[in-house]
Image (cartoon, grey):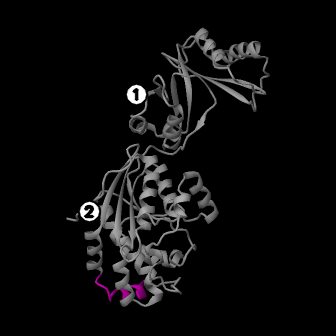
């Protein structure tokens, strides 16, 4: 097989903006596969071709393309001249090692100047295959589907399709900053925004040195895994334990969790605005924990000036867990750690906080000083795929 043919779905509906979406996807594919033995990806008549070099690692190419947003499906294909004889030879050559119960030929003519219509090409090729193999034809549910795509200067022949991630190319929907807790939900929420074309960066609140570095290590691994879908990411590591200690001293126990969350939103918003993100993303699910009731979410959102997006808000835990398993983040998320969400958590947090009550409790805190202290102590790490990570550095706030 000489090429990979990738197809996009939603991009085709983008009207006059479609060329920009396609260019973005092609550019991302080139970056994704730059260290493998492949040629330069190119857009050609509604599909993307990626030439395979001699000895190219198809398994690695397939694994990477399957994770990339914007691709609906892709196939390893034989690239031949747009000539019926050449197409026929490629179809017959590709049958080796196959033993299906039934088959069908599916032809698409991107260039209608080809002399035979698609149904006629299907009949001609179907007869050739049946004469060669004796396999029965099944047009409804074939065991083997042979695809032929006829373009102006070339044709592609391939068997079956590999499923892609779908969605939109990364970077076409702006930047978001995701609050990455280290649990099951927040990586799935981040991935769903990446799949919608967002460039996602991450912020993790930790309680080191009061607690161990385990939650930071989990956040790093989750950031690494998510970077495989968008090629580059930034992770902010914000110390939060000292802030929680001050909240414990000044705030009644029922209000503490909501105030923790409001402080996190303030800190995350500053980072987002400073570094070009246009929204915050959380893994909140309505009613899952005390801070995620409608009443508490409303009070938390009251201090935000950026949109807070919650892609999982209507999901249940089983649905989120299944997605985390498919995504490959589940095994990391369930590792035992000590995170700031479990530190200084009251036994009976309020589930129906009022804005007035929370603001009265916050009056006992120097909010500006607490936020500034967290930002000054924050660190940032850059991640790349396939080159995973560059050394971390202290984040200097101007």
Q: Which residue is drawn at 60% across and 15% down?
A: 90
Where's the C terminus, which quadrant? bottom left
Q: Residue at x 59, y 51 (%)?
A: 326
Residue 59 rendering spot, x and y as whole percentages? 54, 35
Q: In this view, does 23 lie above or below 83?
A: below
Q: Where are the magenta residues, as a range?
A: 355-366
Eye-nearest disc, 1 or 2: 2
Q: Which mark is residue 250?
A: none
Badge 2 is on which residue? 395
Secondary structure character of the magenta stretch overall: helix
Residue 283 rendering spot, x and y as whole percentages? 50, 65
Residue 165 visible? The answer is yes
SS category of the residue bearing label 2: loop
220 lies left or right of 335: left
Q: Which of 395 and 160 is in front in this view?
A: 395
94 lies left or right of 279: right
Callout 1–callout 2 Cβ contact below 8 Å: no
């Amino acid at each position: 097989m000489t090429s990979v043919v990738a197809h996009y779905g939603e991009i085709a509906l983008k009207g006059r903006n479609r060329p920009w979406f396609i260019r973005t996807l092609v550019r991302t594919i080139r970056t994704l596969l730059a260290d493998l033995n492949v040629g330069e990806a190119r857009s050609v008549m509604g599909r993307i071709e990626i030439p395979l070099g001699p000895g190219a690692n198809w398994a690695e190419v397939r694994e990477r393309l399957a994770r990339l947003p914007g691709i609906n499906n892709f196939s390893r294909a034989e690239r031949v001249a747009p000539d019926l004889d050449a197409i026929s030879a490629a179809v017959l050559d590709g049958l080796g090692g196959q033993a299906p119960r039934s088959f069908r030929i599916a032809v698409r003519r991107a260039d209608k100047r080809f002399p035979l219509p698609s149904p006629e090409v299907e009949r001609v090729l179907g007869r050739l295959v049946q004469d060669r193999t004796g396999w029965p034809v099944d047009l409804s549910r074939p065991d083997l589907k042979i695809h032929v795509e006829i373009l102006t200067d070339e044709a592609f022949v391939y068997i079956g399709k590999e499923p892609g991630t779908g969605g939109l190319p990364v970077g076409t929907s702006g930047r978001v900053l995701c609050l990455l807790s280290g649990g099951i939900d927040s990586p799935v929420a981040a991935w769903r925004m990446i799949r919608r074309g967002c460039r996602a960066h991450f912020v993790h609140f930790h309680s080191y040195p009061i607690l161990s570095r385990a939650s930071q290590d989990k956040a790093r691994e989750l950031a690494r895994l998510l970077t495989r879908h968008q090629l580059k990411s930034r992770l902010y590591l914000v110390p939060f334990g000292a802030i929680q200690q001050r909240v414990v001293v000044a705030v009644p126990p029922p209000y503490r969790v909501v105030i923790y969350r409001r402080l996190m939103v303030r800190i995350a918003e500053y980072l987002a605005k400073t570094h070009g993100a246009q929204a915050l993303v959380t893994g909140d699910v309505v009613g899952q924990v005390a801070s995620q009731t409608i009443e508490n979410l409303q009070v938390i959102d009251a201090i935000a000036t950026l949109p807070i997006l919650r892609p999982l808000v209507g999901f249940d835990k089983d649905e989120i867990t299944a997605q985390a398993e498919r995504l490959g983040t589940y095994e990391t998320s369930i590792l035992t750690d000590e995170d700031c969400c479990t530190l200084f958590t009251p036994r009976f947090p309020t589930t129906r906080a009022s804005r007035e009550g929370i603001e009265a409790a916050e009056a006992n805190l120097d909010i500006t000083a607490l936020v500034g202290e967290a930002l000054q102590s924050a660190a940032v790490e850059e991640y790349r795929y396939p080159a995973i990570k560059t050394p971390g550095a202290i984040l200097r706030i101007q």
